[in-house]
Amino acid sequence: MVFSVPVTVRGYELDTQGHLNQAVYLQYTEHARWEMLRAAGIGQNDLIAGGIGPVVLEANIKYLRELRGGDEVDVSCEFDWAEGKIFQFNQRIVKKDGTVCADIVLVGGILDLVARKLVPNPAERLAAVASDPAVLGL
């Protein structure tokens, strides 16, 4: 399942060339991931109470088109579950006219907040906390 959230590029997010600062792309993708968890019925307090938290282990961004102040985009997020402790997030930032501005691939895991190690079954652990695990592709 592909989940997405709308975002409008704000003036204070621009760099000296007048386009979206490179670091803000990661903020947009993180916003989409938290909104996806929220849509699945998982809040930060739920994660903390469950003794777990999502972590990003690796990020790869392909910048394809610039974004400027006032541009309206959709930021998508889709889990790509695998065996083991890690999974992949596939994310895309797309203008309302369909122009793909960035492709982002993140490798993530779920951290046991006490042991400070990745849990061996991240999909299962998130599904146990979610009220709607289908949003997470589970």
Image (spheres, grey):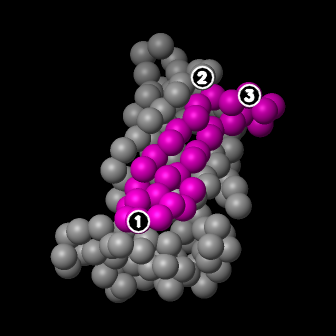
The residue lying furthest to the right in this view is 97
Q: Residue at x 23, y 68 (%)?
A: 117
Query: Residue 51: horizontal and vertical position, in percent?
Result: 31, 81
The stretch of residues the image draws in magenta is 80-109
**Residue 15 is covered by the magenta coloring:** no
Which quarter of the image is occupied by the N terminus?
A: bottom right
Residue 7 at x, y percent in the picture? 63, 45
Label 1, label 3: how far apart the Cα atoms are: 35 Å
Q: Are marks 3 and 2 in contact (CB under 8 Å)?
A: no
Q: Earlier in the sequence, mark 1 or mark 3?
A: 1
**Which amino acid type is marked by label 1?**
Gly
Q: Which residue is mark 1?
A: 84
Q: Does residue 61 appear anywhere in the picture?
A: yes
Quote the CA–CA distance across marks 2 and 1.
32 Å
Q: Earlier in the sequence, mark 2 or mark 1?
A: 2
Which residue in the protein does label 2 denote? Answer: 64
Badge 2 element:
loop
Label 3: state its secondary structure: loop
Q: Residues within 10 Å of mark 2 (few under 14, many from 20)?
A: few
Farthest left residue in view = 115
Q: Quadrant of the C terminus?
A: bottom right
**Numbered badge on residue 4:** none
Q: Residues within 10 Å of mark 3 (few under 14, many from 20)?
A: few
The residue that appears at 35% across and 86% down in the rendered structure is 49
Residue under label 3: 99
Question: Which comes before the other along the chain, label 3 or label 2?
Answer: 2
In the displayed structure, 2 sits above or below 8; it is below
